[in-house]
Image (spheres, rainbow, N blue to C red):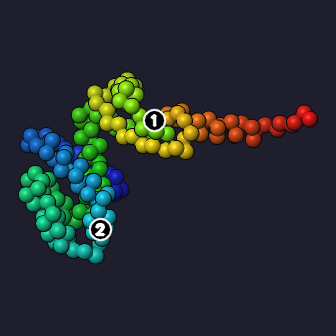
Amino acid sequence: MSEHRIASRYAKSLLDLSIEKGTLEEVAKDMEQFAQLCVSNRELFLLMRNPIVSHGKKLSILDKIFEGKVNVLTLSFFKLLTKKKRENHLPEIAREFTAEYNAHKGIVESSITTVAAISEDIRTEVKALVKKITSKKEVILVEHVDEALIGGFVLKIADRQIDDSVSSKLRELKLKFSQRNFVSQA
């Protein structure tokens, strides 16, 4: 079974159980923190993926890191995954849980890349545009700065991308000119 399919099934089950127990917000915060910890701490990520380290050792490490700091349901979920020898999928499950949570809450995550930081007015306009395009209630906007764009912006919404940057327009022109045989008239 593919890693995405495994992660999706466990994430959906955890989401449903946390809704049933009334702990959705706490579990969502815990899983988001775990996902961020795996990104910022490469050793933890590699430890979870390492087949040589025993499942019991991984569980004891997870207990020491998270006991008393996360919801009881989250810790029980970590223990269940370790017993089923699926703890190597925990980083992907945490990311997938966040995606499931966002879908459940009507939240869409999008990113905008510009040459310079955007103002609050533009941020508000972009969020309104994304809400209109996606029909979602809330927008999480991640901002990036890339001077190579020269001007304009690149807006990514889920699997869609709106590229209105000067650098992409220049690439299009270069492609058009290379496809046509222009002869100078000198």
Residues at marks 1 and 2 touching, judged by CB atoms closer than 8 Å? no
Residue 148 in percent (x, y) is at 55, 45
Marking on residue 80 = none
Amino acid carrying mark 1 in the image = Leu
The percent coordinates of residue 186 (x first, y second) are 92, 35
- Which quadrant of the figure has residue 176? top right
* Residue 80 visible here: no
Q: Nearer the viewer, residue 72 or 17?
A: 72
Q: Quadrant of the N terminus?
A: bottom left
Q: Residue at x 9, y 40 (%)?
A: 22
Q: Residues within 10 Å of mark 2 (few under 14, many from 20)?
A: few
Q: Residue at x 87, y 36 (%)?
A: 184
Secondary structure of the residue carrying tag 2 is: helix
| Mark 1 → mark 2, Cα distance in angstroms | 33 Å
What residue is shown at x 36% (from left), y 40% (from top)? 142
**Callout 1: SS:** strand
Q: Is residue 159 toward the left or the right of residue 97 in the image?
A: right
Vertical placement of residue 50 versus 128, above or below: below
- The amino acid at mark 2 is Glu
Quadrant housing residue 63: bottom left
Position of residue 72 relative to residue 87, above or below, is: above
Q: Residue at x 26, y 45 (%)?
A: 98
Please say if 124 is above or below 72.
above
Q: Is residue 121 visible?
A: yes
The residue furthest right is 186
| Residue that numbered label 1 is attached to | 155
Residue 125's x, y, as percent? Answer: 38, 25
Label drawn at residue 43: 2
